[in-house]
Amino acid sequence: MVSILDDDLLARIHDRAAGYDRDNAFFAEDLAELTAVGYLRALVPTELGGLGLSLLELAHEQVRLASAAPATALAVNMHLVWTGIAKTLRDRGDDSLEFVLREAAAGEVFAFAISEAGNDLVLFGSNTDARPQPDGSYAFTGTKIFTSLSPAWTRLGLFGLDTQSPDAPKLVHAFVNRDTPGVTTLADWDTIGMRASQSNSTRLDGVVAASDRVFRRLDPGPNADPLIFAIFANFEILVSAVYTGIGERALELAVASARGRTSARTGTTKDQDPNTRWKIADAALAQDALLPQLDALAADVDDLVDRGTQWFRALVGLKSHATRTARYVVDQAIAVAGGAAFSSSSELGRLYRDVLAGGFHPSNDDSVHTTVATALLGYLEE
């Protein structure tokens, strides 16, 4: 399998992670090195100037990157998701976002402005006003939260609700440039984990997306448009890869802790303690189930497999499984490591804080269970 991230690069990224977390600082040096090796154009086809990786190959790279620095992996994920969306559409004969691939190859950095405070509809509704203009452009007004890559993005993918057009309501998807008037990045990212991602809120005050950057107008609610599948597929798979990486690293640290701690009671290292061995084994059993599930879904997206109405069930199920498993493995690792993990400078302590972010990424547990139940039982009766 193709690998872009060599061990030396990952070691440098790992060594910087604690400092970024301590200082609540953006991962600028990591991003520069990742850009230099072509990581931000990993999914761009070679004929468009990229490295031509498959989603499966990139998912494995993201597992490795997250094992070194979860916040770096999560933040760069958002750019990679946009390129993945564009590739998924292109692979299925839709070139409406080919400009994303071309611009990523040229060095542009893409970010998401989708999430809004209190909006549990996520992709199926928006509190942001998308006002149509006479020339076909749209002016967006609202506040987006969790805008990862805030200090570095050059292209922002956003959406809002058009309530003015004759065919309204419509959810309008578009891109704007960083220098577009009306874009304000708020300095409000002071979280307990994933600090280096610097996922600040973004205020939009009449931000105009040109008509040629408006790429979808969709009815609110669930939609069969290929864009929705492409977003779900790439976001859920690549976010799951990040949390798979967190679990991998936590398991490594648990093993190291067991071998490095000596019991005052028995005089033997903790890897000889049956309770410790059970904890590590149980964490490993949970972790080992993740990668085959991740691989299967990523490969099916690459191979254009038609799972019909069961696609969304599978995608949200993977995300739920990955984030829950990562949290369980980290918990077990901390139990093995003991009080040392409670230190703010401990890597396991940082993983404990980082892994908590998993519950905030779409789809949350309530939404996951609704999606799976609907796939199996149909919609609730009115």
Image: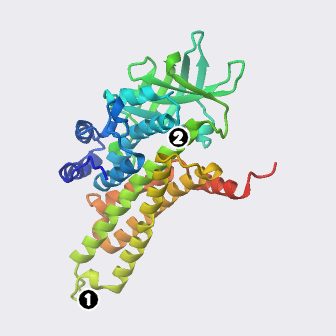
Image location of residue 308, percent across then percent down: 63, 49
Placement of 26 over or under 236, stated as above or below = above
Q: Is residue 24 visible?
A: yes
Q: Amino acid at mark 1?
A: Arg
Task: Please tell me in which quadrant of the rendered image residue 147 appears.
Answer: top left
Task: Please tell me in which quadrant of the rendered image residue 162 appears.
Answer: top right
Image location of residue 49, percent across then percent down: 32, 31
Q: Is residue 56 left or right of residue 233?
A: left
Residue in the image at 52% along x and 33% along y: 93
Task: Please tell me in which quadrant of the rendered image residue 100 appears.
Answer: top left
Q: Nearer the viewer, residue 133 or 204?
A: 133
Q: Which mark is residue 37?
A: none
Q: Is residue 153 visible?
A: no
Placement of 289 over or under 344, stated as above or below = below
> Looking at the image, which residue sits at the far bottom?
266
- Would you call the spot at circle 1 few (<14 residues within 10 Å), some (14-19), or many (20 or more)? few
Q: Is residue 74 left or right of residue 340?
A: right
Calculate the distance from the C-alpha at mark 1 to the C-alpha at mark 2.
56 Å
Image location of residue 361, percent across then percent down: 49, 48
